[in-house]
Image (cartoon, helix red, strand yellow):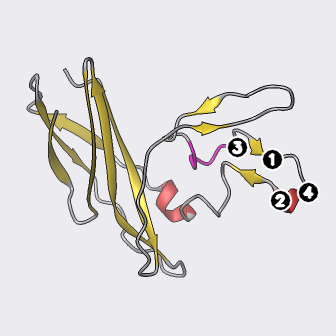
Amino acid sequence: MLRVVTVAFLLLLGSTGAAYEEKDLSCPLPGDDGPDIPSTAVCDGAMDCVIGTGEADERLYDESPEICAPLPYLEKEVVLESRAVTSTSAHVSWSTVTRHVPGHELKLAGYFLSGKSVPHSFQNSISARLTSYQVQW
């Protein structure tokens, strides 16, 4: 049975393409490796850590505009539903998301869909035009 489904947005800057690999963010603290923050929690609007110990302009924050989408993308709640779940597949659908925010160069390029149902997992990159997808593992 499908237990976890995560939708993450892939963004492109202008016409530049980029690959996305989902991985946790390591949050180092002085004298410690620090907690790992799940990639789905990065850019959620809550500051979880500061990466780096240099001057303020040399630090990278987990909520930095350098790595996070503009607020209009983050503030939009996406409702995710799963139907027709079997031992090898599920049909997932979600509410639409704004594909372009006026005043920002970023455009929604697609979704990174990942999930796990022990002992199976899946990862798929799909078009921003879709609002549903048949996942198979």
**Relative image position of residue 11 (x, y in whole percent):** 44, 65
In the picture, the disc for residue 47 is 3
Tag 4: amino acid:
Glu
Left or right: 109 as drawn, with respect to 76 = left
Q: Which residue is mark 1?
A: 52
Earlier along the polypeptide chain: callout 3 or callout 2?
3
Crowd class of label 3 (few under 14; some 14 to 19; many from 20; radius 10 Å) = few
Measure how far apart labels 2 and 4 are at the Cα level.
Answer: 5 Å
How far is mark 2 from mark 1, CA to CA? 7 Å
Write down the region rendered in magenta. 42-47
Up-down: is 28 above or below 11? above
Among the two numbered marks 2 and 1 on one chain, the one whose residue lies closer to the N terminus: 1
Q: Amino acid at mark 3?
A: Met
Q: Are marks 2 and 1 in contact (CB under 8 Å)?
A: yes
Q: Are marks 2 and 4 in contact (CB under 8 Å)?
A: yes
Question: In which image quadrant can residue 68 be found?
Answer: bottom right
Height in image: 44 above or below 70?
above
Q: Nearer the viewer, mark 3 or mark 4?
A: 4
Tell me what residue is drawn at x 73 percent, y 28 percent. 34
Indicate whether residue 43 is drawn in magenta: yes
Q: Which residue is mark 2?
A: 58
3D distance between C-alphas at marks 3 and 4: 18 Å
Q: Which amino acid lies under the numbered mark 2 shown in the image of this protein?
A: Glu
Residue at x 44% of width, y 44% of height: 22
